[in-house]
Image (cartoon, rainbow, N blue to C red):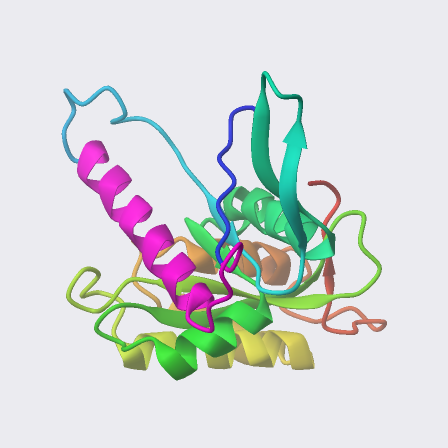
Amino acid sequence: QGDATLGFWGWPFASTDAPVQAARAALGIRTAFSRAAANKNHPLSDFAMGIGLAHGRAVAGKIGTSEQVKVTVFGPVVNLASRLEGMTKRLRVPIVMDAATAAIVRERMPSTEGRARLLARVLPYGMESPANVHELVPPVADVPELTDERLADFEQGVKDFIAGDWEGAYRALLGMPASDRAQDFLLQQITSHGRVAPPEWDGVIRLPGK
């Protein structure tokens, strides 16, 4: 897909475990690029990647000619995954998920494999309805600075932000370790308004582009 790769699960054989398999693949990709970044001699050491994960129904099948054919998927959920991938730069995290995928990760994926945390409520560019977006976080063994307690504190800060308590959100987010860049996006929103939510605040951040 140009400079990106599209992966999907659940076709041609349906699988109730497809979202978990996709999450495992995303975490595996993140780990591979983290290892490359740790080696200055690796050709991908300065390469940045972002992954968007969305769960739902899509149209799948083969397109093309007999000489050049490919299997792909189409539909709103595919567009959402693309928007989520584009958000990784703005939200400063490697993997962004929609609410449906995050709910399945919380329910079915052991915390020793991966975890989810709420990042924000946004209106993606070109879409009509706002959505809660989440990060797929590696287990504590891989990111010891992001304990379950700190993830819970972060999520409370996000909920305070959405509810309009920007002073409470500021205090919660400021307690995150400096190495965690996820706080930057909301803190920038908060500080640019003097830690006070605008009078018309509805909890939704409207993203200006893809």
One can see residue 1 in this view: no
| Residue 110 vertical placement versus 4 (above, below) | below
The spot of residue 175 in percent (x, y) is 36, 71
Q: Nearer the viewer, residue 35 or 113?
A: 113
Q: Main secondary structure of the magenta part?
A: helix
- Of all residues, the one furthest to the top in this rendering is 67
Give, as a single range, the part of the protein colored magenta: 10-37
Q: Quadrant of residue 47?
A: top left
The spot of residue 160 in percent (x, y) is 58, 80
Residue for point 36% across, 75% down: 151
Judge left or right: residue 181 versus residue 34.
right
Q: Quadrant of the N terminus?
A: top right
Q: Was residue 11 drawn as part of the magenta stretch in this picture?
A: yes
Q: Quadrant of the C terminus?
A: top right
Judge left or right: residue 188 versus residue 116.
right
Residue for point 63% across, 65% down: 56
Q: Nearer the viewer, residue 64 or 17?
A: 64
Judge left or right: residue 123 versus residue 142.
right
Q: Was residue 21 drawn as part of the magenta stretch in this picture?
A: yes
Residue for point 24% across, 47% down: 31
Residue for point 45% across, 42% down: 50
The spot of residue 64 in percent (x, y) is 67, 26
Q: Quadrant of residue 35?
A: top left
Judge left or right: residue 123 versus residue 103.
right
